[in-house]
Image (cartoon, helix red, strand yellow):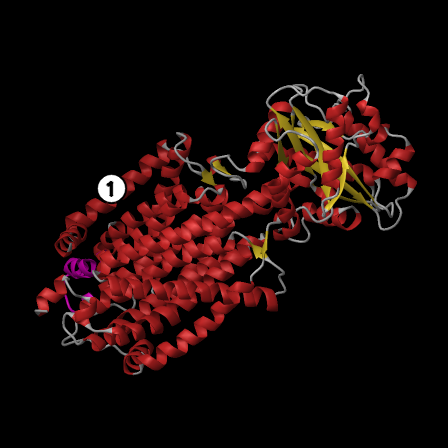
Amino acid sequence: MDRFFHRWARMVSSPRGAKTVIACWLILILALSAFAPGSKPYAVSSGEGSVRNNTPSAEAQAIMDEHFPSGEGLAALLVFHSQGKMPAEDRDKIKRISEWLASEDKPQHVASALPFHQFPDAVQDKMFSEDQSTVLLNVALEKDLESDQIYETLQEIRSRVEQIKGAGLQFEITGPAGIAADTITLFKNADFVLMLATIGLILVILIFIYRSPLLALLPLIIAAMVYQVVDRVLGIAAWNGWLIIDKQALSIMMILLFAVLTDYCLFVISRYREELKKIGSKYDAMKVAMAQVAEPILFSGATVFIAMLTLFAAVFKPYHHFAPVFSVAVIVMLIGGLTLIPALFALIGRKVFWPFVPKLQDGTNKATGFWTRIGAVVTKKPAATAMILLLLLGAASFNIGSMSYSFNLMKSFPEHISSRQGFEILEDRFPPGKLAPVSVVLHSDTEIELTESFVNKLAALAESLQGEDGIYEIKPDITPDLAQPDAPLPRSLMAESRKAVKLQVTLKENPYDPTALNLIEALREKSTALLKDSGLDPSRYSMHYAGQTAEQADVRMMNQRDILATFSLITLFITIMLALQTRSILMAICMMATILLSYTATMGLGWMIFHHILGYEAISYRLPVYTFVFLIALGVDYNIMLVSRIKEEAEKHEWREAIRRGVSRTGGVISSAGIILAATFCVLITQPLQELFLFGMTMALGILMDTFLVRGLLLPSILSLTGGRRRYLRGSKINKAIGE
């Protein structure tokens, strides 16, 4: 392996090799830019389903689509609200709006709308909230609309309503269509803003660290070149249908790409400058530098790649669809780190450090500074250092058990967003369950005969459901009149196929609260018993639950399953990678254990900040998975860099001295890289979605904790305590060289 990296270093760092590498990258970028599509036109929102489409709610929806077909798609809930009882003139305005939505002049993609204007006053009164301040109009859009079409249709509705309603009537649009439109509003131009913020922030930090214009600009130029290739490769793959590009994954990938490539540049720059002080030739200096850092870069990239591959094992669409985007990006980033970075810096040479150009120095360059002192303290008092840090990190980890998770996307939206305001108005003035009723479908493989016996059994089933704690009402009412031979069930209740019956259940609780999700899970478990108690044969009939509450119950189930699968696989595979890189199982276990502790401490400390300081009652259920995948994968990088340098120093020095020198030599570059990576994730804090805000803050907190406490103090102290070269490096090439 060492021989391979030396050959690789000579190839990419020679005058001819460096020019060839840069020429190949430029030709590739020009060719892809000319002939390949970009990724953004193919980016989609993954939704919250299963990639296998086999969840109970998906099966229920499939039955609904088969037996209750409809040309209607997403629903928009138009909310009209006044401060007190709604005046008659405002009611007249709502009638005018209802007439327009039912006319030929309505927006093109509106399939149907509640005919409020056709109802008698007595019926209209019942549609208002108890205080007569709020009324809701349902508008169904056409099926299979693109997100832009949904946005434009609702904008047309909003514009017309604003012309009619006047200043005294509050109007909001919520519901699935309103949420989809507001999501577009929130993320309009978000990628462009994120890129500018990321580039600007990295540029400022690099200038502050190196005070060299070229050293600040070149990492960004390299990242931009690699991004062009990644973007076009993803575009080609999406165009051919080879993968699905998730919008959120694309945004986070862009931030990660600039941050990681900047980190790779820092690792190469640091070692290159060190070698330029010893070697006169700029090409020879890069050969020596790359011979030492190529392996750590390869293994750090490989660990991130493997972490992303494990997401293919996830069944939840947002997790699963992160895998292809990040896998492609990491491969191209790794190739860029091993070719483009050394080639470009080798060609420019010492001038890249202007105005602080490194000069040849006689003798050994003795390291000084903050990390030199830290290395000395850690190796002199490893037991005390490890004990203090383990207690602090353990105490922070303790809070992880009290974390609460939200499955309500609305709570992640800013408070001023229309869909959230409309949702909260309805939540305050109507039974919460009316926001998203549950459809209960009684299905049979054979036609259902409408006999008096069947209707009585159906009525008994409805009565049993009504008796369940947490159910507000069931519609339609199953009355004795329906038991007459010629009395049909309501059109909305019996399917035309006569193989399914549908009831609409309104819950007492908010349909996204854990209580509502628990109720759906309990009803699923009781379905057979409910059928038997109602006199319906479970071998012939089956019960299914469709709607947003049922879908979120499945999301919770998938999330729990994916947490177990991804956490286990990532931990296992990265530990194996570390063992291969360090050639020591013990060292790999120590490194992985400290990284896992860093994760639990980050989540616990983050929850303490979010809950007790910022006042959040719950956080997004996705946060643990996203944080684990990225924090573990990226945290490994810095540990690999440190341990690689310790191994190198161990060839010439006693074990604790090697650790001291490793901390001293890598401390500055790794802490700089950690600050840049944390700062780039902080860019997400500027985003309006609470989920991204919390993810950005958690990642920044975890990266800083891992960089300064775990990598800088805890891991070196544990390595100092648990053994020397013989224990950690047994069987390696280093052992053979020192005769062990």
Q: Nearer the viewer, residue 436 or 498?
A: 498
Can you give x and y, in whole percent of width and height, for residue 428 in the image?
Answer: 77, 51
- Give x and y (percent) for residue 368: 27, 79
Image quarter of residue 656:
bottom left
Q: Residues within 10 Å of mark 1 (few under 14, many from 20)?
A: few
Locate residue 139: give its quadrant. top right
Residue 285 within the segment the image draws in magenta:
yes
Name the residue that disc number 1 marks. 24
- Does residue 651 appear to the left or right of 372 in the view shown? left
What residue span does the magenta drawing correspond to? 275-294
Among the 4 quarters of the image, the one containing residue 280: bottom left
Kindly identify the residue that appears in the image at 25 percent across and 58 percent down.
579
Instruction: Assign the C terminus to one quadrant of the image.
Output: bottom left
Tell me residue 246's x, y (percent): 47, 41
Residue 681 visible in the picture: yes
Q: Is residue 40 left or right of residue 331?
A: right
